[in-house]
Amino acid sequence: MDELFVEEGTVLSNDKGVAEVEVFPEEKCEECSAKIFCKPNKDNKNIVRAENSIGAKIGDYVRIEIKGGSILSASFVLYGLPLIILVAGIFLGLVIFSSYKLAELYSALFSIGLTAIYFLLTFFQNKKEKNHILPRIVSIKKIN
């Protein structure tokens, strides 16, 4: 069974099936592994972008769910794969630039360049696929 993180908050904006939800910080926020999805804005409010397939409107109090597998996937895309590319780029660069006097420097620059290309491709891919690995709104709660 997949781990499930549940948060509640208020919908701040809604655009093309993706809502920005303000979640209310708790003491356990510092240790939360879902922090990769939750980031403070300029007013220091924690904002989560979530898939809004149930049609929540601005001002609605909603419940969102984040699957543990989504957190693992996002962490691997943001941290694991770039690290693998960086290390592989260094070794590949050492092979490619072995005849040069400053092979280590060229190898390091080559590796950083590969990692930068990876981040650019990931950035543009995420712009194209907005709902790729987003938490989703599962219910709208009534406030009396």
Image (cartoon, helix red, strand yellow):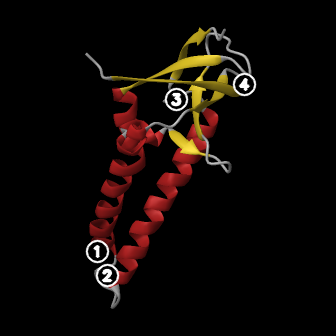
Q: Amino acid at mark 3?
A: His
Of the residues under marks 2 and 3, which one precedes in the sequence? 2
Please state, as top left, top right, bottom left or bottom right, where the C terminus lies in the image: top right
Q: Quadrant of residue 54?
A: top right
Note whether 62 is above or below 105 in the view shown: above
Return the residue at label 3: 132
Q: Amino acid at mark 2?
A: Glu
Residue 89: percent from the left, percent from the top? 34, 64
Cα distance between the residues tagged 2 and 3: 37 Å
Return the residue at label 2: 104
Local packing at callout 4 (Cα closer than 10 Å; few below 14, some 14-19, many 20+) is some
Of the residues under marks 3 and 4, which one precedes in the sequence? 4
Cα distance between the residues tagged 1 and 4: 49 Å
Note whether 100 is above or below 4 in the view shown: below
Relative to 123, is 107 on the left or the right?
left
Q: Looking at the image, is mark 4 or mark 2 nearer the viewer?
A: 4
Return the residue at label 4: 14
Q: Quadrant of residue 45?
A: top right
Return the residue at label 1: 94
